Image (tube, rainbow, N blue to C red):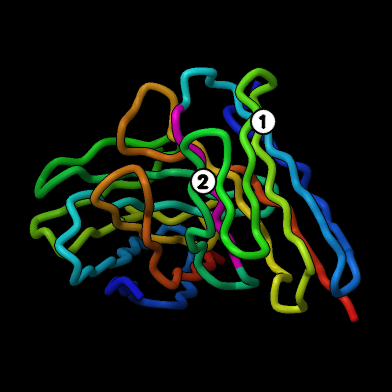
């Protein structure tokens, strides 16, 4: 299995609080991605990174920011969590478009 | 038209049966296609890649129909362990490093 971890794995927070999710890889892959998965919508791209300090928005980026200061770490921040951001968040890594390797996911509940 | 569309199912089949899923895509210029498998409450994992007319791996066969813009996944001799959600995935239009995921087709194999 690809060396990719996510933390925390589960989190319950309240509306309006900031939340940061961490993705850590040991594969030295160039690309890193954050997705959210919701029933009926499938996986939707939030933000992605194509190198250290190089990031870009995905299709559902509103309310989220990211940072990548090291190759191995990609952080997703919800500046002020809302109930609509309750979801399962997956991080993925890749060296090319051919295959993305996913982390185990983070279940986030915003009350 | 969505970039990729799938029948959500569920497909309920007995063990040993043959089952096929179809997936339609909108970008006629797509050159590569993927099927990912996702078990309940787990991360997606690459099952098969399709670059030309099709691909076969054991009991699994993926076929591409460019004229009609659909790809199919055929599973022969279904096993209980095949029960999962199968995600149809295409490169996101206009990009070289992003993927667009279908919402998935759920398969339940029963005794």
* Most common secondary structure along the magenta stretch: strand
Residue indicated by mark 1: B70
Q: Which residues are magenta?
A: B31-38
- As drawn, is B45 to the left or to the right of A56? right
The answer to whether dots 1 and 2 both sit on one chain is yes
| Residue that appears at 90% across and 81% down | B111
Q: Chain of mark 2?
A: B
| Residue that appears at 39% across and 68% down | A103
Q: Is residue A42 above or below residue B68?
A: below
Q: Position of residue B88 (x, y in %)?
A: 60, 45
Which corner quadrant of the image does residue A75 belong to?
A: bottom left
| Residue that appears at 61% across and 28% down | B25
Q: Position of residue A48 (x, y in %)?
A: 29, 44
Can residue B100 be seen here?
Answer: no
Can residue B64 be seen here?
Answer: yes
Badge 1 density bin: few <14, some 14–19, many ≥20, Cα 10 Å: some
Q: Position of residue A15 (x, y in %)?
A: 48, 60
Q: Chain of mark 1?
A: B
Q: Is residue B92 above or below residue B36?
A: above
Based on the picture, tell me whether residue B60 belongs to the magenta stretch.
no
Q: Nearer the viewer, residue A100 or A54?
A: A100
Mark identifier at residue B34: 2
Q: Nearer the viewer, residue B54 or A39?
A: B54
- As drawn, is B98 to the left or to the right of B56? left
Instruction: Label 1: state its secondary structure.
Output: strand
Q: Nearer the viewer, residue B92 or A43?
A: B92
């Amino acid at each position: 299995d690809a060396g990719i971890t996510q933390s925390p794995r589960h989190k319950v927070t309240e509306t309006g609080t900031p939340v940061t999710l961490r993705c850590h890889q040991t594969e030295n892959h160039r690309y890193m991605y954050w997705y959210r998965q919701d029933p009926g919508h499938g996986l939707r791209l939030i933000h992605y990174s194509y190198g250290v300090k190089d990031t870009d928005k995905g299709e559902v980026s509103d309310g989220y920011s990211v940072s990548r200061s090291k190759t191995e770490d990609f952080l997703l921040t919800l500046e002020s969590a809302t109930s609509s951001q309750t979801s399962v968040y997956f991080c993925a890594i890749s060296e090319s478009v051919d295959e993305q390797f996913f982390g185990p996911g983070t279940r986030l509940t915003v009350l | 038209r969505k970039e990729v569309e799938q029948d959500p199912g569920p497909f309920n089949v007995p063990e040993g049966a043959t089952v096929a899923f179809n997936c339609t895509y909108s970008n006629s210029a797509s050159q590569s296609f993927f099927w990912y498998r996702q078990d309940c409450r787990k991360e997606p994992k690459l099952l098969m890649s399709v670059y030309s007319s099709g691909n076969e791996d054991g009991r699994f066969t993926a076929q591409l129909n460019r004229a009609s813009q659909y790809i199919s996944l055929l599973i022969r001799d279904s096993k209980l362990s095949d029960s999962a959600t199968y995600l149809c995935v295409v490169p996101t239009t206009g990009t070289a490093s992003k993927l667009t995921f279908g919402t998935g087709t759920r398969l339940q194999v029963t005794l």
